[in-house]
Image (cartoon, rainbow, N blue to C red):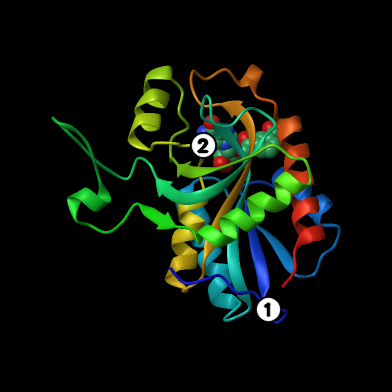
Amino acid sequence: MSQFHHNENHKILVMTAVEAEAEAVLRGMGGDGRFEVALAGVGPVQAAISTTRLLAAGSGRYSLVVSAGIAGGYAGRAEIGSLVVSSEIAAADLGAETPEGFSSLDELGFGSAVVPVDRALAERVAGMLAAAGLPVTLGPALTLATVTGSAATASMLAARFPGAASEGMEGFGAAAAAADFGLPALELRAISNAVGPRDKSLWRIGDALKALEAAFAAITQSWRD
Ligand SMILES: O=C(O)c1cccc(C(=O)CC[C@H]2O[C@@H](n3cnc4c(=O)[nH]cnc43)[C@H](O)[C@@H]2O)c1
């Protein structure tokens, strides 16, 4: 895989699902002009449409697309308030159910449900977060159109994607759009809840937004082109 290169003529496009996430990212960045933040909308399809629209309008303006926001964390991999940097971005429910189990798009021969991530870039970003004292996991970031709401589905996904760290709804859409423009993609998530039985009263959205803000403060302060 090609090595990620960034120069001062390009910007890093950060896509968040909702306004509260964009605001947290912007607070962290403190006006760093090398980054641009835009709204993706909720879900993989909306994220792909929004990202494609921006990349098409920006022709050649961007060097990297980052899908950022809050997310669910897989048990034992990413705790509430911690951060996940993607090692790959996978559309976890894109495929077919068969009598023998789930078959991914790849197994069906219809393309790929995984967008690879430049390993050196992911390690570099995770290193910036760790150096700032922020808890961070490097691992697969799953994208689902339906938020997981049971222990059974959480276990099944964790088994299907060994090391699965985070679950969001937009990463694969933004990353697929980036890939279509020949750009690398990365997902950066702050964990608001555990993936599993749905209980919104246990979501710690405020803590996750603070972690997201801290993450972008650390990245912009240590980013060198
Ligand atoms: O209610 C609020 O104040 C608020 C502030 C910021 C964000 C939200 C959202 O509900 C964002 C939806 C967004 O969250 C991601 N997410 C979070 N946890 C999970 C999960 O367990 N599984 C899948 N996605 C999750 C997702 O990317 C949504 O777009 C509310």
Q: Residue at x 78, y 38 (%)?
A: 210
Q: Residue furthest right?
A: 30
CB at disc 2 and ligand 1 closer than 8 Å: no
Where residue 167 sits: x, y (%)? 51, 37
Q: Residue at x 64, y 57 (%)?
A: 124
CB at disc 1 and ligand 1 closer than 8 Å: no
Residue 50 visible in the shown view: no
Where residue 127 sits: x, y (%)? 67, 51
Which label sits on residue 165?
2
Residue 153 visible in the shown view: yes
Q: Residue furthest left?
A: 99
Which quadrant: the C terminus? bottom right
Tell me the SS state at disc 1. Answer: loop
Which amino acid, by three-letter code, is at mark 2?
Answer: Ala
Tell me the SS state at disc 2. Answer: loop
Where residue 209 sits: x, y (%)? 74, 38
Which label sits on residue 55?
none
Q: Which residue is mark 1?
A: 7
Q: Residue at x 45, y 67 (%)?
A: 179
In the depicted structure, whether residue 178 falls above or below residue 57: above
Where residue 30 sits: x, y (%)? 86, 57
